Image: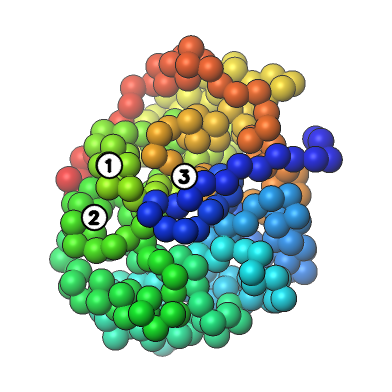
Amino acid sequence: MPDFYFMEYRLLGKSSLNISRIGFGCMSLDSASPASGKILQQALYLGINYFDTADMYQKGLNEELLGKAFKGLRDKVIIASKAGNQWRPDGSGWDWNASKKYILQAAEASLRRLQTDYIDLYQLHGGTIEDPIDETIEAFELLKAQGKIRYYGISSIRPNVIREYISRSQIVSVMMQYSLLDRRPEEEMLNLLQENQVGVLARGSLAKGLLVSKPATPFLNYDARQVKLAADAIRELSDGQRGPTQTALQLVLRQPGITAAVVGMRTSEQLREAVATIDSKQLNPEEMEQITKAIPANMYEDHR
């Protein structure tokens, strides 16, 4: 892998957040390992400035990891966190809580763990159509007015929920799963979000590694045979100038409306593979068509 990497940046929706097209999904980092702090700092050195965490990851320890890693570097990074999943007092699991009271409490706790006065992007970590949506929005708007968050968004794959927040709130982003093995957002959501100037943060773009390295197993509505066909299509268009990781991520980043791919990385090699996506040989339209024809695109079945 090269020693120098080129990074691109884009504004996230209607916000002033100029984020790296490869974002760092922090969920899988080992919060107890000193190596995790080092890889976060290495990512910043390589041009990544967007780091995504949540209060539920390792029961808050993931946020603490970011707070320690970026102490003294706060103005160099864009930190995104999430709330809505409330841990039970006995630690046995969590329950969904989108109430105004809880969101405000969760934000205060996240600010302490992150060792910061503000969160750049605060996201609702899910959401259902039965939520008290106006009350949830009130919480985010209050936090924004208080200067405790700069912008807010939601992390959701549910079209009915996304539509409500587009029409009733000032969200600047939606985080959703998108890859060759999950093209449901193409059906309607990507166009709708682009029309409303809401940025899209794509997660799961490597489909848990199934598109690049792991043996084929069923994924969503695809059986193992179809998953293998998808991975084979990625590999067929990967060579010395562009590896499978870069091919899979470029497929996502070439989709209009997607601001960044938020990638989970645990090692320096995974980090370098992801960052190299920007400067590697770009997919041309014919290659894009070849990959997307490998398997039929899936559609939403629920939450329409």
Query: Helix or strand or loop: what does disc 1 sit on?
Result: helix
Cα–Cα span, label 2 and label 1: 10 Å
Query: Helix or strand or loop: what does disc 2 sit on?
Result: helix
Tell me which label, 3 or 1, sits earlier in the chain.
1
Is the residue under label 1 in contact with that under label 3 (CB below 8 Å)?
Answer: no
- Which residue position holds label 3? 259
Is the residue under label 1 in contact with that under label 2 (CB below 8 Å)?
Answer: no
Q: Residue at x 28, y 37 (%)?
A: 191
Image coordinates of residue 58 in percent, x first then y, are 55, 71
User: As drawn, is 20 to the left or to the right of 17?
Assistant: right
User: As drawn, is 43 to the left or to the right of 171?
Assistant: right
Quadrant for the N terminus, please: top right
User: As drawn, is 202 to the left or to the right of 274?
Assistant: left
Tell me which label, 2 or 1, sits earlier in the chain.
2
Q: Residue furthest right?
A: 3
Is the residue under label 2 in contact with that under label 3 (CB below 8 Å)?
Answer: no
Q: Nearer the viewer, residue 134 or 183?
A: 134
